[in-house]
C-alpha cells in the first residue's frame, strides 16, 4: 500500500450517491481500516480520506498530494460520539452549530483531544471537524468506525475536484480507491469557523453562509481579511491558507467594477490587449456581449443563482487548463451569501491579480 513502491493500482468503484450500496461501502471501509487512502464524495468537493488515528496513513495523504505539512486536514465524523473522541473541550457554540447545520457544509475548529495525531492538525492544538451531508460519506465513516481525516482530493494547489474524473486526473494509481458518485452538490469547500475564541471567527467562507449563521444560530461572526481571500496576515490566523490555492495552470486576472457593464468592458479590453490565448469566464447574463465582440468566453452559470456559479467554478478552471488557455479573465461577484466563498476562491486562484 505504499506509493513509493510505484506499483499502486487504484480501484475505481461506482457507488449510488442517493442509496449507497451496502456491500460496496463495506468493501471500501475495509480499505480505510487497513490504513489505505480513499477518495470519496461529499456535498462540497471530493475528499482524500484516511483513518484519522493512523499516523502513517495521514502522512501518506500529505505525500500523495504534495501538501505542505503545516496545512491541517479536516476530520470528518458521522455522529457526535466521534466529535467527543476528537475534542475534549467542545464549546457550547460548537454544539449549537452542530444542531442546526450538521450534517452539512460547515467545519468547526476547536481544541483537539490527545487521540488526534499532530500530523492531522499541522502541529496545532486545535482540530477542524465536520459531519458531511453526503450519504456516501456518512455511510463510509460509519462503517469504517473511525473519523476520517480528509483534505480535498486534488494535487496541492490545483482546483478542488467536483467529480471523480477530476480525482482520476490528479491521483490515479497514487491512492488505493476512488469512489465515483458523480458530481458533488455545492462545488466549493466547506465554511470553516473557529469557535475557540470569545467571538467566533470565519476562517474560510463556504456554502453555509455567514448570513445563515446569523439568522439560524444567532451569532455574529468576525470576517477577517483572510476569509475574503486577501493575502496579508494570513499566516497567523489560518494555517495552510497562506499557500496559493485553487489555481489553474493558466495565469488568471479577476475583473472588478461598480456595475456589470464596467466589468464586461474591462474584460474585453484585457482580452484584446494581452496577445496570448485567453478566455473570459463570464455568466449567462453577460456571455452574449463577448460573443458579439468576438472575444472567447464561457459561462460559469447565472448571476440570479450564485450557487450555480460555485458549482461550476472548479470544473471550468480545469477546462481552461485542458484547452491550454494562457490567461483566464474572470468576472467578479457580489460578496453576499455564497458570493463571499466564490470571491475568496477567485482571489486566491488569481494570486491576487485583481483589476
Ligand atoms: P482542504 O479540505 O483541502 O480545503 O483543507 C482543509 C483546510 O481546513 C485547511 O486548508 C485549513 O485551512 C483548514 N483547517 C484544518 N484544520 C484547521 C485548524 N485546526 N485550524 C484552522 N484551520 C484549519
Ligand atoms: Mg484543498
Image (cartoon, rainbow, N blue to C red):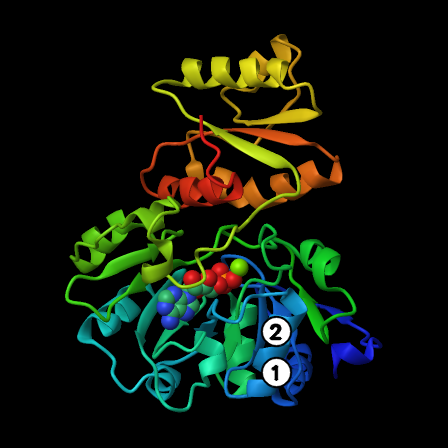
Task: Tell me if I can see residue 96 in this picture.
Answer: yes
Q: Residue 9 falls in which quadrant of the image?
A: bottom right
Residue 219, position as x, y percentages in the image: 17, 57
The image quadrant where one finds ligand 1 is bottom left
Residue 221 position within the rendered picture, expressed as x and y whole percent measured from the top left: 21, 55
Q: Which residue is mark 1?
A: 57
Residue 103 seen anywhere in this rendered image of the structure: no
**Residue that badge 2 annotates:** 61
Q: Residue furthest top?
A: 292
Query: Looking at the rendered structure, which numbered label has been put on residue 198?
Result: none
Say if mark 2 contacts mark 1, CB within 8 Å.
yes
Q: Judge from the rendering whether residue 238 lies leftward or rightward of residue 139; answer left or right.
A: left
Question: In the picture shown, does residue 256 fall above or below 20?
Answer: above
Residue 159 in picture, x, y percent from top left: 59, 50
Q: Nearer the viewer, residue 31 or 172?
A: 172
Residue 157 place in picture, x, y as percent = 58, 54
- Quadrant for the N terminus in the image: bottom right
Q: Residues within 10 Å of mark 2 (few under 14, many from 20)?
A: many
| Secondary element at tag 1 | helix
Amino acid at each position: 500500500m505504499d506509493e513509493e513502491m510505484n506499483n499502486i493500482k487504484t480501484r475505481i468503484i461506482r457507488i449510488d450517491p442517493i442509496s449507497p450500496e451496502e456491500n460496496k461501502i463495506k468493501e471500501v471501509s475495509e480499505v480505510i481500516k487497513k490504513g489505505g487512502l480513499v477518495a470519496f464524495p461529499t456535498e462540497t468537493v471530493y475528499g482524500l480520506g484516511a483513518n484519522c488515528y493512523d499516523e502513517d496513513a495521514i502522512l501518506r495523504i500529505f505525500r500523495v498530494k504534495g501538501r505542505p505539512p503545516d496545512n491541517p486536514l479536516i476530520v470528518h465524523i458521522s455522529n457526535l460520539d466521534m466529535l467527543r473522541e476528537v475534542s475534549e473541550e467542545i464549546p457550547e457554540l460548537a454544539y449549537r452549530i452542530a444542531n442546526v447545520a450538521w450534517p452539512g457544509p460547515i467545519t468547526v475548529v476547536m481544541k483537539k483531544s490527545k487521540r488526534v495525531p499532530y500530523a492531522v492538525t499541522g502541529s496545532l492544538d486545535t482540530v477542524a471537524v465536520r459531519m458531511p451531508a453526503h450519504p456516501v460519506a456518512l455511510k463510509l465513516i460509519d462503517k469504517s468506525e473511525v473519523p476520517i481525516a480528509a483534505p480535498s482530493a486534488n494535487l496541492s494547489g490545483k482546483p478542488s475536484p467536483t467529480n471523480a474524473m477530476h480525482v482520476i486526473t490528479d491521483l490515479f494509481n497514487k491512492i488505493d480507491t476512488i469512489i465515483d458518485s458523480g458530481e458533488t452538490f455545492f462545488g466549493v469547500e466547506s465554511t470553516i469557523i473557529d469557535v475557540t475564541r470569545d467571538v467566533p471567527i470565519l476562517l474560510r467562507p463556504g456554502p453555509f453562509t455567514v448570513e445563515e449563521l446569523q439568522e439560524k444560530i444567532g451569532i455574529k461572526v468576525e470576517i477577517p481579511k483572510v476569509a475574503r481571500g486577501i493575502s496579508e496576515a494570513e499566516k497567523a490566523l489560518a494555517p495552510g491558507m497562506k499557500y496559493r490555492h485553487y489555481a489553474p495552470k493558466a495565469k488568471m486576472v479577476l475583473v472588478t467594477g461598480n456595475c456589470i457593464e464596467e466589468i464586461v468592458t474591462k474584460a474585453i479590453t484585457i482580452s484584446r490587449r494581452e496577445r496570448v490565448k485567453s478566455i473570459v469566464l463570464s455568466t449567462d447574463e453577460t456571455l452574449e456581449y463577448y460573443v458579439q465582440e468576438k472575444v472567447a468566453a464561457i459561462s460559469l452559470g447565472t448571476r440570479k443563482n450564485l450557487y450555480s456559479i460555485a458549482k461550476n467554478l472548479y470544473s471550468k478552471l480545469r477546462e481552461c487548463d485542458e484547452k491550454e488557455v494562457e490567461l483566464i479573465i474572470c468576472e467578479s461577484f457580489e460578496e453576499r451569501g455564497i458570493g463571499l466563498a466564490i470571491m475568496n476562491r477567485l482571489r486566491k486562484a488569481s494570486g491576487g491579480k485583481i483589476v
